[in-house]
């Protein structure tokens, strides 16, 4: 960063907020923002940084918004009345539709970049993908990218539409499969002596997802393509229900295309 910035982290008490506090602390003066001053103090003492409530964002150069998806729009609207001219707001919501409304309401004196770190509260930026959706960047983009580079993240830039469409596949469809498998097996307890190696790997992945269940269910509900994605999966399951020779042939063609795009290309 050009100079040591003041960074406010709204929701810095939550899962992802705490990741931001830990990761950004070496690079900036941090203030953890909570709806409760007592909670802010508790977490700021834990991390050895400042604590405050939303009004204390008035002094920050950069304000991260790390609150639930459904509260992101409302929190940003409040911030528009508080933050100082020239500052940058960065939300990290896993769904970006709120931005369509926000970009029309963004005051001239505030910059805004939306960001989606593609890891959960157990993770860190190093070697993980981070998607950026610049709304009004006013020369902040290169500084943010430099900061993320220093943290070891792999950044890419996209649009609101593309982000939510791709995430309806990578998050909605993917997580939904795990949730449905768990639901399917929930009434048939099977002894662990029958677990295969690959089933054990699936269970380990499921545990990762289950730890983050609130965030995952929020994405299922808030992604604008969520219902469509789940409906498409339902139709696909019905299509391949008899798995006769013709269906197997069609399925194999699709698996070949999937391998080419998702596995071979990335090896
Ligand atoms: N979890 C993930 O894997 C993940 C990954 C990438 C991005 N994200 C995104 O990161 C954001 C935060 O997710 P998280 O999992 O860290 O959530 P979280 O653990 O529930 O933390 C969110 C924080 O927001 C505050 N908050 C809760 N309800 C609020 C409300 N109604 N209005 C304003 N603030 C409220 C709370 O802080 P106070 O009580 O102190 O105010 C809470 O600690 C979400 O937008 C999510 O989509 C999550």
Image (spheres, rainbow, N blue to C red):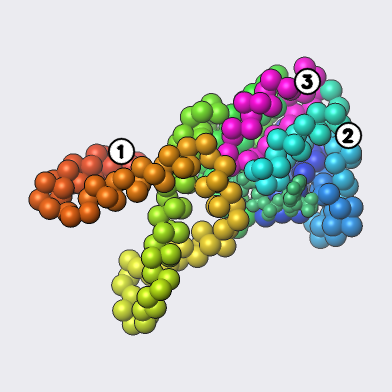
How far is the residue under mark 1 from the one under mark 3? 41 Å
Q: Residues within 10 Å of mark 2 (few under 14, many from 20)?
A: some
Q: Residues within 10 Å of mark 3 (few under 14, many from 20)?
A: some
Q: Which residue is mark 2?
A: 59
Q: Residue furthest top?
A: 108
Residue 240 in view of the camera = yes
Is residue 99 a member of the stretch shown in magenta? yes
- The image position of residue 39, as x and y in percent, is 84, 57
Residue 223 falls left or right of residue 233: right
Nearer-N-terminus badge (2/3): 2
In magenta, the rendered stretch is 86-111
How far is the residue under mark 2 from the one under mark 3? 17 Å
Q: Which residue is mark 3?
A: 107
Q: Secondary structure at mark 3?
A: loop
Nearer-N-terminus badge (1/2): 2
Q: Are marks 1 and 3 in contact (CB under 8 Å)?
A: no
Nearer-N-terminus badge (1/3): 3
> Residue 261 bears which disc, if any?
1
- The image position of residue 132, as x and y in percent, is 58, 32
Residue 20 in view of the camera = no
Residue at the image position 83 percent from the left and 49 percent from the top = 35
Q: Are marks 1 and 2 in contact (CB under 8 Å)?
A: no
């Amino acid at each position: 960063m050009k100079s040591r910035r003041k960074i406010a982290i709204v929701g810095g008490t939550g899962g992802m907020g705490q990741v931001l506090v830990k990761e950004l602390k070496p690079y900036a003066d941090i203030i953890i923002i909570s709806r409760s001053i007592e909670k802010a103090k508790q977490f700021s003492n834990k991390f050895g940084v400042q604590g405050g409530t939303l009004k204390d964002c008035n002094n920050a150069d950069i304000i991260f918004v790390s609150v639930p998806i459904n509260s992101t729009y409302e929190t940003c609207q409040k911030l528009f009345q508080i933050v100082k001219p020239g500052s940058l707001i960065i939300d990290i919501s896993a769904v970006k539709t709120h931005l369509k409304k926000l970009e029309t309401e963004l005051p001239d004196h505030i910059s805004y970049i939306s960001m989606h770190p593609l890891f959960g509260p157990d993770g860190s930026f190093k070697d993980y993908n981070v998607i950026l959706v610049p709304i009004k960047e006013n020369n902040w983009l290169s500084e943010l990218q430099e900061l993320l580079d220093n943290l070891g993240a792999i950044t890419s830039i996209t649009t609101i539409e593309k982000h939510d469409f791709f995430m309806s596949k990578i998050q909605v469809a993917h997580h939904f499969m795990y949730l449905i498998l768990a639901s399917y097996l929930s009434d048939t307890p099977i002894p662990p002596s029958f677990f295969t190696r690959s089933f054990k790997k699936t269970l380990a992945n499921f545990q990762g997802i289950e730890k983050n269940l609130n965030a995952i269910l929020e994405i299922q509900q808030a992604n604008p393509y969520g219902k469509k994605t789940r409906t498409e999966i339902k139709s696909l399951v019905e299509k391949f229900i008899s798995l006769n020779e013709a269906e197997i042939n069609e399925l194999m063609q699709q698996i070949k295309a999937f391998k080419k795009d998702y596995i071979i290309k990335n090896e």
